[in-house]
Image: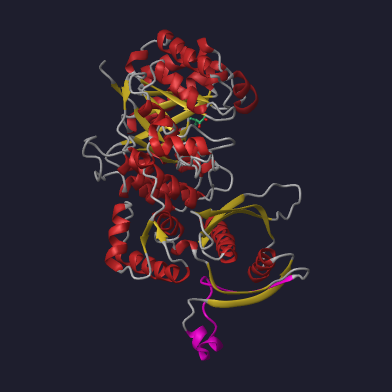
Amino acid sequence: MAKDKLYIFDTTLRDGEQSPGVNLTANEKVEIAKLLSKMGVDICEAGFPMSSDGDFEGVQRIAKEVGPLMDGREKIGKPMVICGLSRATKGDIQRTYDAVKYAPLHRIHIFLATSDIHLEYKLKIDRAECVRRAVEAVAFAKTLCDNIEFSPEDAARSDKTFLCEILGKVIEAGATTLNIPDTVGICVPEEYGALFKYLRENTPGSDKAIWSAHCQNDLGLATANTLAAISNGVRQVEVTINGIGERAGNTSLEEVIMALYTHPDHYPVYNDIETTHIYRISQIVIQRSGMPVQPNKAIVGVNAFAHESGIHQDGVLKNKLTYEIIAPELVGVPSNNLVLGKHSGRNALKNKLEDLGIELSDVEFQKFFLRFKKLTDAKKTITEQDILALAGDEVINQDSLETYKIQNILITTGSDVLSTATVTLVDTSSPAEESEGEDEEHKKSEGKVLVDAAIGHGPIQAAYYAINRLIGRNISLKQFEIQSVGAGDDALGKVFVRISQDAEDKESKSKQFAGHGTHNDIIQASVKAYVNAINRMIEVERKN
Ligand code: KIV
């Protein structure tokens, strides 16, 4: 059977970034986009340029720095298409074009709601006006660029005959991809598949465009719906790493890719994703977004390849095929074996980083080597998982995320007593104070040194209260999660937090910010995560 190419459209940096608390810096977006490109993603939706200056900068940098890259794409033969999302207005479309135009291959993705509920209550327009706006927007975008995607938002709840009408008109105006979003995640697979069959059969000019699926996961059916869409003629799927996205998230890239991989005869499509990159990029997205995946998450959760029961373990030992449908190596899950130790030098670490596909500049490597050496003092066996966790924690140039640097933490704690934390931070946005120069410790400081102490019910609360006092803000902790990297009493601890600044107006809901920290001491990991979230909050304030 001749197979069609299935285009993989990754929207981790746009729809994924719309997850509560996720605020990626432009550096992080570029880092993730590079990994997506190398993995073989065809189209990267890099952001929504009109939504903020920060988003515009991120998309523009990706277009310039990642758009031309061919590394790892020799088989595909062309660089990744860089796409920006846009509302159906000239101002939005122009701004999107100004951000994506630097990429050799670029796309403008226009969306406009088509369901009666959105037309009546959100847009307050009728269907005729909706068609007029869609056609005008696509025609204008076409004057700027050839590659235009149109999404009728809330398509799954829109009237089917109206969809055929508007889609036929936007094809005529120049749309090259038609994306049919299940915006509220309400569809079941048979229904979503049938929608594509109907639209493809009844939309004038339907064979001139590529049909695309975009599913939200509100009913946990995003992957199943996406597969049903492929069976009904869809040749582009919109996905995110780890399935991150608004509410319950989007279709996850790794699930769709591995479902297709394990069923080569079932779907008449092929794709160009290099599956061995999946685990690593999943880990980077976890760290940068501050959104851990649940242990039983398909493909990338810590339990995805763990066999617990005796019968299963016995079967796997005799033959892995008894209980394993995917070899962990196929998705790049690193081994848990000792790989490096106290005596490993720079070369051994460099080689291991290379094996794991981690690329560092010389400056980043020096910093990483010091961190690695520190870890070997506390942990005898350094595994690939540890190296990936450290790499995800702090490697890329994070200067913009270091308004506050942790200099020291002193904790006193015990049973039946309040804990006390004394925290020293350096505020790199303020100059070091004159008098500080007399003291050797302060002389080296990159900013104003701040010291304060607080008490709390436990060391972490005490440390967080001390930090709130130091920075003079009322920060609330919304979520706290701790995971260990591998096993053993010397395992690294990974902490994820979500914070918000208490709104002055008690009624208003304040924005959340995620942060993460990895350390072999879980209190230090907790403080790193909290300070990381605060620094992200400040970065967003600065950009807006
Ligand atoms: O869910 C949705 O409707 C979207 C569109 C903008 C594609 O994200």
The picture quadrant where one finds residue 315 is: top left
- Indicate the position of residue 160 as horizontal and vertical percent values: 52, 12
| Scheme of image coloration | secondary structure
- Indicate the position of residue 67 as horizontal and vertical percent values: 30, 44
Q: Is residue 101 visible?
A: no
Q: Residue furthest top?
A: 202
Say which of 533 and 125 sits in front.
533
* 167 with respect to 505 (left or right): left
Say which of 104 and 23 sits in front.
23
| Quarter of the image where the N terminus is located | top left
Q: Is residue 320 visible?
A: yes
Rendered view: 236 above or below 369: above
Number of numbered discs on residues: 0
* 8 with respect to 377 (left or right): left
The picture quadrant where one finds residue 260 is: top left
Rendered view: 515 above or below 295: below
- Indicate the position of residue 87 as horizontal and vertical percent values: 49, 33
* 90 with respect to 515 (left or right): left
The residue that appears at 26% across and 45% down in the rendered structure is 69
The residue that appears at 47% across and 16% down in the rendered structure is 193
- Residue 426 colored in magenta in the image: yes
- Indicate the position of residue 190 as horizontal and vertical percent values: 51, 14
Q: Residue furthest bottom?
A: 438
- Residue 298 colored in magenta in the image: no
* 158 with respect to 145 (left or right): right
Range shown magenta: 419-443
The picture quadrant where one finds residue 219 is: top right
